Image: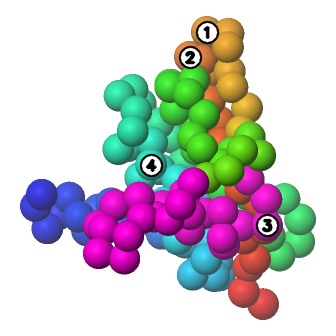
């Protein structure tokens, strides 16, 4: 992977947050806005999109739509499974999401059309800095 690709992946969500006048997001929200799209990038084959919504004063919802209707472990109240070994370089993303968010959820979009099917999964409880 080139340094440019790595840099764009790590700064992309930050640019989106700034463009939507949400520059005061905490590191937790930035982490979640990176982990969810990364999961879709690594584990689905179609397009995906990041969605940010202000849900209440001082908070934001981070969600990702992708074309794969399979629900990741831990998003339907099911157990996530054991954490990967300490030396592992992969497998921590959803553990981080579950640990950092107040709530996680998923909607499977069965009808093709504007949404192109797939799912919308995300989390709430990302505080904004005062």
How far, Cα to Cα, is label 3 from label 4?
Answer: 19 Å
How far, Cα to Cα, is label 4 from label 2?
Answer: 19 Å
Please tell me which residue is depicted at 56% across the width and 16% down the height of the picture.
116
Residue reaching furthest right?
Answer: 56
Please tell me which residue is depicted at 52% across the width and 32% down the height of the picture.
66
Q: Are marks 1 and 2 in contact (CB under 8 Å)?
A: yes
The residue segment tinted magenta is 81-105
Q: Which mark is residue 112?
A: 1
Mark 1 crowdedness (10 Å alpha carbons): few <14, some 14-19, many ≥20:
few
Question: From the viewer's perspective, is the residue at label 3 or at label 2 nearer?
Answer: 3
Front residue of 56/75: it is: 75
Of pointers 1 and 4, the one earlier in the residue sequence: 4
Residue denoted by label 4: 39
How far, Cα to Cα, is label 1 from label 2?
Answer: 5 Å
| Above or below 117: residue 81 | below
Of pointers 3 and 1, the one earlier in the residue sequence: 3
């Amino acid at each position: 992977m080139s340094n440019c690709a790595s840099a764009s992946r790590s700064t992309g969500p930050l640019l989106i947050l700034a463009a939507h006048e949400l520059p005061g997001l905490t590191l937790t929200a930035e982490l979640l806005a990176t982990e969810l799209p990364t999961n879709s990038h690594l584990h689905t084959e179609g397009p995906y999109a990041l969605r940010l919504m202000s849900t209440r004063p001082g908070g934001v919802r981070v969600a990702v739509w992708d074309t794969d209707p399979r629900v990741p472990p831990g998003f339907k109240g099911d157990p996530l499974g054991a954490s990967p070994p300490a030396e592992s370089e992969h497998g921590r993303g959803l553990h981080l999401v579950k640990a950092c968010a107040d709530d996680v959820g998923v909607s499977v979009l069965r009808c093709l059309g504007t949404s192109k099917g797939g799912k919308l999964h995300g989390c709430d409880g990302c505080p904004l800095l005062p």
